Amino acid sequence: MDTDVGEVGRLLFGRPCRLRVALWIHARGARRFYQSEPPDEVIPQSAAGTELRRFVHLGMLTEHREAGSRRVYYETTNSPLWNIIVAAARVMGPPR
């Protein structure tokens, strides 16, 4: 498919960065990551916390805060909503 992931993300998911960050998380596998880890070309750091909290609210991620650290960590869950992202990854193809 020759459609831009940002355009699909904006039209289908409300904001271009939503699909990009979900695809980035999916591509990592089940590895834990911290809030500021997604690169700027995936999601602006100013939007990362808000968008990641949306995934927490949907049950797709769990949020962890460690005592004495300001970092917020996230882990994927086994939510069936990830199947939507898996399908989107197949349709969109590899990142450009």
Image (cartoon, helix red, strand yellow):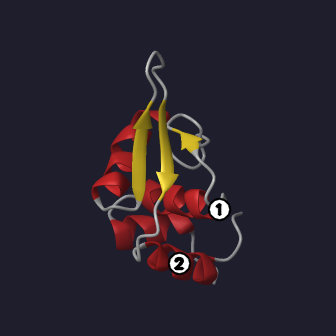
Disc 1, SS:
loop
Q: Position of residue 81 (x, y in %)?
A: 40, 74
Q: Position of residue 84 (x, y in %)?
A: 45, 78
Image mark for residue 88 = 2
Q: Residue at x 34, y 61 (%)?
A: 59
Q: Residue at x 56, y 64 (%)?
A: 23
Q: Position of residue 35 (x, y in %)?
A: 49, 37
| CA neighbours of label 2 inside 10 A, class few (<14), some (14 to 19), many (20+) | some
Residue 26 or residue 90, whichever sits in front: 26
User: Is residue 89 toward the left or the right of residue 62 in the image?
Assistant: right
User: Is residue 30 toward the left or the right of residue 7 in the image?
Assistant: right
Residue type highlighted by circle 1: Gly
Image mark for residue 29 = 1
Q: Residue at x 36, y 68 (%)?
A: 13
Q: Quadrant of the C terminus?
A: bottom right
Residue placed furthest toward the front: 67
Disc 2, SS:
helix
Where residue 47 sits, quadrant-wise, is top left
Where residue 94 sits, quadrant-wise, is bottom right
Q: Residue at x 57, y 69 (%)?
A: 4
Q: Position of residue 67 (x, y in %)?
A: 43, 21
